[in-house]
Image (cartoon, helix red, strand yellow):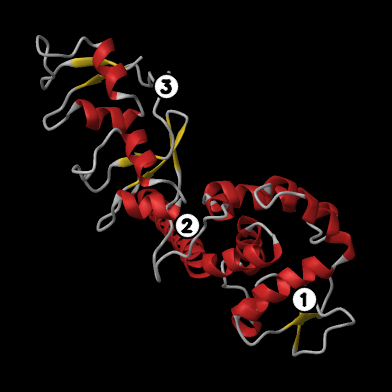
Amino acid sequence: MNRARLAIILMMLLAVSSCSVQNAAVSTQGKDAYSAYIAKYSGMAVDQMKKYGIPASITLAQGLLESDAGRSVLATKCNNHFGIKCHSDWTGRKMYHDDDARQECFRCYRNADDSFRDHSLFLVNGARYQSLFKLGSTDYKGWAKGLKAAGYATSPTYATKLIELIERYGLDRYDSKKSVRLKPGQIPHQPLLVNGQNCVRLREGETLKDIAREYGMQLSLLRRFNEVDRKFTPPVGTLIYLERKKARADREHKAYVVKKGDSLWSISQQFGIKVSSLAKRNSIGDGNPLVTGMTLLLR
């Protein structure tokens, strides 16, 4: 291979590598922006739910989608988080922006709070949205499909996108009547799925009480799901389950080799298995203690 050809190949590889790094950076920034938006505006969404019965998850998902997590031109220049157009009854400040057609008229607000309030009133007072209020405030799928059917947006995948955002970021946690505001600046957890069970990862500086509060759960129930007592504080990074663990692991995890520092409990948290089931399946007890290098059956 001559030097010229080798140089071209190296340049191509560097370009691909650079592109991958840039894409990864964009992806991370996008994820952080969405989480930050949820942390900042979840309280407003819960307030609107309590006043008007619109699921907080729907309000947050629409805000994320319509405003690109608060980064759109309408959001940054007009505090318009929901893409609501002027219509004939709007007498406030306006902004003209290209959307379905060129230079359409959009509403402008003093702040985000006014935008969230007007979004609620827009739905409450809109004749085509009245059927949605017959749905429960926890039926986010029904609301998403109903908004699309009523013509809130022209995108054929609008309902699907809303549902995907709600489930990806666990926004339905805010639909509970017990929903509370997150602490100022607190980033909500992104739910994980391990062994078919919902869980989150414990972060530095937080406790099980913080997670129970965020999800509107009883602390005693959260402890029970994770098989811990009041005196034990799980280490940072531990998976914390929001529902009861199972008796066996999924099909992808049949066995596990015990590492230094492992305990039955830490392994049970890693794979979403009950401690008692793990011990019974492997006959772990006084006569057969857990030791490094042992192979445990997980299912």
Pointers 1 and 2 in contact (CB under 8 A)? Answer: no
C-alpha separation, residue under disc 3 versus residue under disc 1: 49 Å
C-alpha separation, residue under disc 2 versus residue under disc 3: 29 Å
Is 35 left or right of 206, judged from the image as shown?
A: right
Q: Which SS class for mark 3? A: loop
Q: Earlier in the sequence, mark 3 or mark 1?
A: 1
Asked whether 67 or 246 is in front, the reply is 246
Asked whether 52 or 20 is in front, the reply is 52
Is 229 left or right of 210, judged from the image as shown?
A: left
Q: Residue at x 57, y 46 (%)?
A: 167
Residue assigned mark 3: 250
> In the image, is residue 282 above or below residue 242?
above
Q: Which SS class for mark 1? A: loop
Residue assigned mark 2: 27
Residue assigned mark 1: 98
Res 155 quadrant in image: bottom right
Where in the figure is residue 133, as x and y percent of width and height? Answer: 78, 56
* Discs 3/1, front: 3
